């Protein structure tokens, strides 16, 4: 259990998110410990190409309009809550 570096929730199970996707050369690059819902939300909204092009830091992720509204919502959720994350309609078409 740890703290999500994106939403700041405590006592959550975290996963390692490569700020530059591994397939784009980020295998040994910077990483962030994110709770599972935050990590899934990033990948549900954006392709690895989009992440590599403009979302390679925590501040860029927090500033993104779609993610900012999710972060605002997730911060209010209990760390024990399990939620389903679906790919965005735009992302499903890609």
Image (cartoon, rainbow, N blue to C red):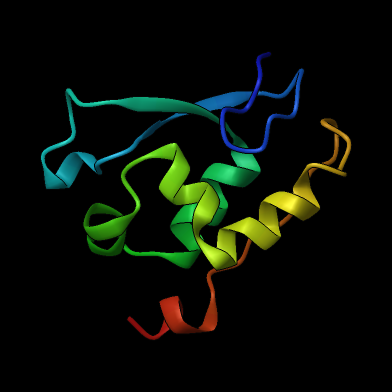
What residue sits 68% from the left and 50% below the top?
A: 71
Indicate the position of residue 13 as horizontal and vertical percent values: 66, 23
Nearer to the camera, 20 or 94: 20
Which quarter of the figure is the N terminus placed in? top right
Left-right relation of 27 to 84: left
Point 61% across, 66% down: residue: 86
Q: Please give left or right for residue 79 compared with residue 66 in the image.
A: right
Asked if residue 25 is positioned above or below residue 67 in the image, the reply reads above
Seen in the picture, residue 62 relative to 5 is either above or below; the reply is below
Residue 78's image quarter? Answer: top right
How many numbered discs? 0
Q: Is residue 44 left or right of residue 85?
A: left
Query: Height in image: 62 above or below 22?
Result: below
Q: Quadrant of the C terminus?
A: bottom left
Which of 52 and 47 lies nearest the eye of the viewer? 52
For the residue pair 84 and 47, the one nearer the viewer reads as 47
Q: Is residue 70 above or below residue 38?
A: below
Q: x%, y% of residue 40?
A: 54, 50
Residue in the picture at 57% in, 28% down: 5
Residue 89 x, y percent position in the rendering: 52, 83
Residue 43 place in picture, x, y as percent: 44, 56
């Amino acid at each position: 259990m740890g703290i999500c570096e994106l939403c700041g929730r405590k006592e959550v199970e975290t996963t390692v998110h490569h700020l530059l996707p591994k397939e784009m050369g980020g295998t040994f690059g910077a990483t962030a410990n994110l709770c599972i819902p935050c990590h899934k939300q990033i990948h549900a909204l954006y392709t690895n190409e989009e992440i590599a092009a403009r979302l390679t830091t925590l501040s860029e992720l927090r500033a993104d309009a779609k993610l900012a509204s999710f972060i605002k919502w997730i911060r209010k959720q209990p760390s024990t809550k399990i939620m389903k994350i679906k790919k965005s309609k735009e992302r499903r078409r890609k």
